[in-house]
Image (cartoon, grey):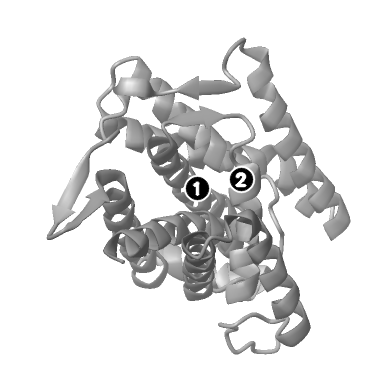
Amino acid sequence: MTEQLFNALSLGFTYSLISLGYSMVYGIINLINFAHGEFFMLGAYAGVISLIIGIPWYISFFISIIVGAFVSTFVEVIGYRPLREKNSGRLTALITAISFSLFFQNFIFLFPGADLIGLGNRNPMHGAVITVGDFKIPLIKFFIFVVTIFLLILLILIVYRTKIGKAMRAVAFSKDISSLMGINPNFVISFTFALGGGLAGAAGFLEALDKNQVYNFMGVIPGLKAFIAAVVGGIGSISGAVAGGILIGFLETISVVIGLSFIKDVISFVLLILILILKPSGLFLKTQREKV
């Protein structure tokens, strides 16, 4: 039971870390960034390559965060910002996001053999376990749990206890009003993308350690499920993104435990349909104030 609990939590926390990027970006500019799964993938690649060339795992972890944040900010600056300045419609932004996603997925093919890289014995947590009574918990599962809790606390402190966090909430309420108050909306939006991309990169590295490999399409399914988690929890809500990710992680783990692993990937989409029918605003919708 303890082992399955940690399996569910580690899976749910992985979805939550990715989902937070969807929620924060949507909350600040009402954009569904479907390239977000690729920040997860690229962060994983950066961390794995760092490990392979001999960089310690804890430095590789920070490298994955930095790469995820950098790529996310790069996409925002060269892709989404010009669209905002031209007042392009949401459909244009959506097509741009999908285009970036396809570009990053296929960019890996430019490097022969890079579409699938195994870590093997270079994985510092491969095969390591923590014994709790009669239960053995994989070290990577426990590590995902601890790191995610730390990152969530750090994110909450940034959003609710710092000036940049106040600026993020101000821009989410109104870019025009916040700019009149001396806030640079473009900087705040870029910072939000960097924050979400960094969390996705961290999740990618943790997933690579768990699966002991990386491949160029590894961000597709987790990215979709993280988006579903954001919608289920109430997109734009940080607590909703976390709760949605954990819920999906538990449902998938339960399906495997009871012998229905063949429907594991279907559960998320069924849940999405039910939420859209029964409560389209999500389970943790924040009270919305009308902008005048």
Which residue is pictured at 57% across the width and 75% down the height? Answer: 233
Q: Quadrant of the C terminus?
A: bottom right
Amino acid tagged 1: Ala
**Residue on which disc 2 sits:** 37
Which residue is pictured at 36% across the width and 22% down the height? Answer: 120
- Report the side of 20 relative to 3 (left or right): right
* Quadrant of the image occupied by residue 127: top left
Which residue is pictured at 30% across the width and 59% down the height? Answer: 3
Q: Tell me if residue 213 comes above or below residue 250 in the rendering.
A: above
Q: Quadrant of the N terminus?
A: bottom left
What is the residue that sits farthest to the front in this orientation? 259
Asked whether residue 216 is in view, the answer is yes
Nearest the viewer among 72 and 227 is 227
Nearest the viewer among 44 and 64 is 44
**Residue on which disc 1 sits:** 200
* Quadrant of the image occupied by residue 100: top right
- Residue 207 pos. (x, y %): 44, 42
